[in-house]
Image (spheres, rainbow, N blue to C red):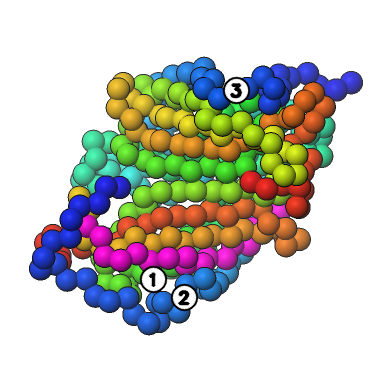
């Protein structure tokens, strides 16, 4: 018997759709666990004294791959396991610190089908602390064109991220 | 990062011919120091509270991807060196070209400003990832709030042990001199 899970298909998505927001209370554990999970040993992500006295920041702060990982989780909450990331791009404007409550928001910019028949949603996401934008992020994610379609099955020339 | 007008009196040297010769050439090629490990998938998912069943449920992974795969955004994890190894005095650096440019362009400070990644074949447990670093561009002299310097774009192209493309990470860096240094 096939396992059961939610799967978003491209016909359920249209330009201007907003993704459900996600709020996360960031702790020192969030920062340190994410840094070590991504094999980032640099001290500003686990050593508060170093972060303050060498980097001049208020505390340890979230590292780049961990931010990418949180954006992936946010997208996968929306798209389900059949959503397949093709491309991401992001820019960090402000750091994320323990004690911050961060909020992820997103909107669908474009829906399209490429020359090999793969369906794509382009989305713009943002990570904010209060009203402050910390990171802007965009992604191109492949979604099933209909029930039964599986973007993960695409290989070689059938995958054009 | 916003640009500001260049100020008179801050000297940034020309781009050496040797550095120009690095453009679009594979400058470094390296192999991951360990096989891709599934335990890291779960540690990463736990860190971001990512409950995607593709990474936790073997039946879902079998149905969708013919077995377990790594979360795509973990790509850079597989080419980051160990913090310590016996007989090694210091850890090798990822993004070696970034540090070469700082040295050879005489720009003592540098930050990463943008990151872009395109994903290919999924990465699976047991894979060994090879990475090729390629310099794509070096800008004219620019001035930002950090100082005066140059932007550069570096690709890290990644393939698995079968030579299949698994992704390319593109890093934009800004190497600069602060006002005091220039």
Give the percent coordinates (x, y) of residue B162: 76, 61
Residue shown at the point (47%, 18%) measured from the top left: A21
Q: Horizontal placement of A103 versus B105: left or right?
A: right
Classify residue B26 by image quadrant.
bottom right
One can see residue A89 in this view: yes
Whole-Å distance between the Cαs marked 2 and 3?
44 Å
Q: Is residue A68 above or below residue A99?
A: below
Element type where label 1 sits in the image:
helix
Q: Mark 2 vs mark 1: same chain?
A: yes
Q: Are marks 2 and 1 in contact (CB under 8 Å)?
A: yes
Front position in the image: B51 or B35: B51
Q: Is residue B151 above or below residue A118?
A: below
Residue shown at the point (57%, 43%) measured from the top left: A87
Q: Mark 1 vs mark 3: same chain?
A: no
Considering every residue shown, the one lying at the far right of the view is A1
**Residue linked to disc 1:** B100
One can see residue B49 in this view: no
Front position in the image: B92 or B155: B155
Q: Point out which mark residue B181 bears.
A: none
Give the percent coordinates (x, y) of residue B55: 68, 33
Name the N-terminal-most of marks 2 and 1.
2
Judged by its main secondary structure, the magenta piece is: strand
**Residue linked to disc 3:** A14
Element type where label 3 sits in the image:
loop
Front position in the image: B115 or A101: B115
Element type where label 2 sits in the image:
loop
Look at the image and give the residue range highlighted in magenta: B127-143
Q: Horizontal placement of B8 versus A133: left or right?
A: left
**Residue linked to disc 2:** B22
């Amino acid at each position: 018997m096939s396992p059961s899970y939610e799967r978003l298909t491209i016909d359920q998505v249209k330009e201007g759709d907003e993704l459900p927001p996600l709020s996360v209370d960031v702790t020192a554990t969030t920062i340190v666990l994410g840094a070590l999970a991504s094999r980032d040993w640099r001290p500003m992500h686990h050593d508060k004294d170093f972060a303050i006295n060498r980097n001049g920041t208020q505390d340890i702060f979230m590292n780049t791959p961990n931010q990418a990982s949180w954006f992936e989780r946010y997208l996968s909450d929306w798209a389900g396991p059949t959503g397949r990331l093709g491309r991401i791009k992001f820019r960090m404007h402000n750091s994320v610190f323990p004690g911050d409550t961060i909020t992820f928001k997103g909107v669908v910019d474009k829906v399209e089908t490429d020359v090999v028949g793969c369906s794509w949603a382009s989305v713009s996401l943002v990570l904010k602390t209060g009203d402050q934008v910390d990171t802007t992020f965009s992604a191109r994610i492949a979604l099933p064109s209909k029930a039964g379609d599986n973007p993960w099955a695409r290989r070689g020339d059938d995958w054009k991220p | 990062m916003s640009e500001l007008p260049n100020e008179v009196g801050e000297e940034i040297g020309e781009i050496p011919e040797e550095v120009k010769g690095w453009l679009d050439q594979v400058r470094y090629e390296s192999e991951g120091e360990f096989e891709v490990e599934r335990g890291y998938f779960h540690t990463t998912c736990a860190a971001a509270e990512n409950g995607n069943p593709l990474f936790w449920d073997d039946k879902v992974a079998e149905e969708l991807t013919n077995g377990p795969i790594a979360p795509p955004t973990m790509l850079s994890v597989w080419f980051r060196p160990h913090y310590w190894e016996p007989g090694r005095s210091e850890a090798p650096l990822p993004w070696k070209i970034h540090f070469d440019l700082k040295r050879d362009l005489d720009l003592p400070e540098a930050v990463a400003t943008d990151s872009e990644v395109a994903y290919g074949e999924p990465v699976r447990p047991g894979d060994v990832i090879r990475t090729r670093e390629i310099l794509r561009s070096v800008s004219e002299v620019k001035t930002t709030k950090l100082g005066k310097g140059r932007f550069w774009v570096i690709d890290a192209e990644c393939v698995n042990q079968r030579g299949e493309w698994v992704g390319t990470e593109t890093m934009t860096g800004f190497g600069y001199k602060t006002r005091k240094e220039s």
